[in-house]
Image (cartoon, grey):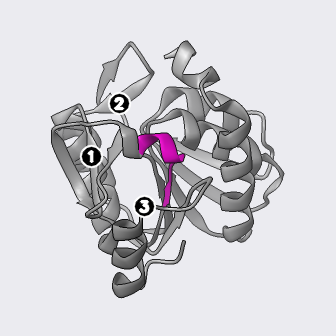
Amino acid sequence: YSERRELNQATKVDIARLCAKQIPNDCSVFLNIGTTTEAVAVELLQHQGLLVVTNNMNIANILSAGSGVNVIVTGGNLRRSDGGLVGDFAKATIQQLRFDYAVIGCSALREDGDILDFDVQEVGVSKTIIRQSDSVILVSDSSKFERKAPARIASIADVDMFITDSGLPAACADFCRTSNTDV
């Protein structure tokens, strides 16, 4: 996980800065598991009046330094490799809440618009996050188009905004246009 955190670090910071600009003060935000969402957490430290819910212990620790940010941790089964909280307990907590914004990451992306992950328990949590959010922002660097993962989280059509670092494959760009997903 520490190696993944360092991979494309400058790109993740750029994506995170742009994402943080999309989130106003005085709102509720869900940040899920991932190194790019952790970078978003750092960029949100200067916000005021945020309620951030997360299933990522690393994000909770990052945001504990922000005086204008209240943090709720979902609970769930701790995945020691990355500090993620997954499983039915995490989903049940999320179902009790509603979010103005959700910022999600992924393990892989397909050109046809599928958002993918490796962990089926994490996928269930991510689907719940999307259902409970008014606006969903996907943050992912373009290297995710080169990866494969077996479990489908959602479609880019289920996302309001996709923040990435470079041009999309033509098929994905067309899909985003027809789905009204801002890139």
Query: In the rendered image of this protein, does residue 27 appear above or below residue 117?
Result: below
Sequence-wise first label, 2 or 1: 2
Q: Residues within 10 Å of mark 1 (few under 14, many from 20)?
A: many
CB atoms of marks 2 and 1 within 8 Å: no
**177 or 34: nearer the viewer:** 177
Rendering coords of residue 104 (x, y %):
45, 52
Instruction: Please indicate whether residue 48 sits to the left or right of residue 54 in the image.
Output: right
In this rendering, the label closer to the viewer, 2 or 1: 1
Point out which mark residue 169 bears. 3
In this rendering, the label closer to the viewer, 3 or 2: 3
Rendering coords of residue 151 (x, y %):
16, 42
Instruction: Please indicate whether residue 49 sits to the left or right of residue 97 in the image.
Output: right
Residue at 42%, 42% (x, y): give it: 144
Q: CA distance from mark 2 to mark 1?
A: 18 Å
Instruction: Please indicate whether residue 169 sits to the left or right of residue 94 in the image.
Output: right
In this rendering, the label closer to the viewer, 3 or 1: 3
**49 or 131: nearer the viewer:** 131
Q: Amino acid at mark 2?
A: Leu
Sequence-wise first label, 3 or 1: 1
Q: Amino acid at mark 1?
A: Leu
Sequence-wise first label, 3 or 2: 2
Q: Which residue is mark 2?
A: 85
**63 or 122: nearer the viewer:** 122
Q: Secondary structure at mark 2?
A: strand
Q: Which residues are magenta?
A: 138-144
Rendering coords of residue 36 (x, y %):
57, 40
Is residue 9 something one can see in this rendering? yes
**148 or 138: nearer the viewer:** 148
Q: Which residue is mark 1?
A: 116
* Residue 137 inside the magenta-drawn segment: no
Q: Amino acid at mark 3?
A: Pro
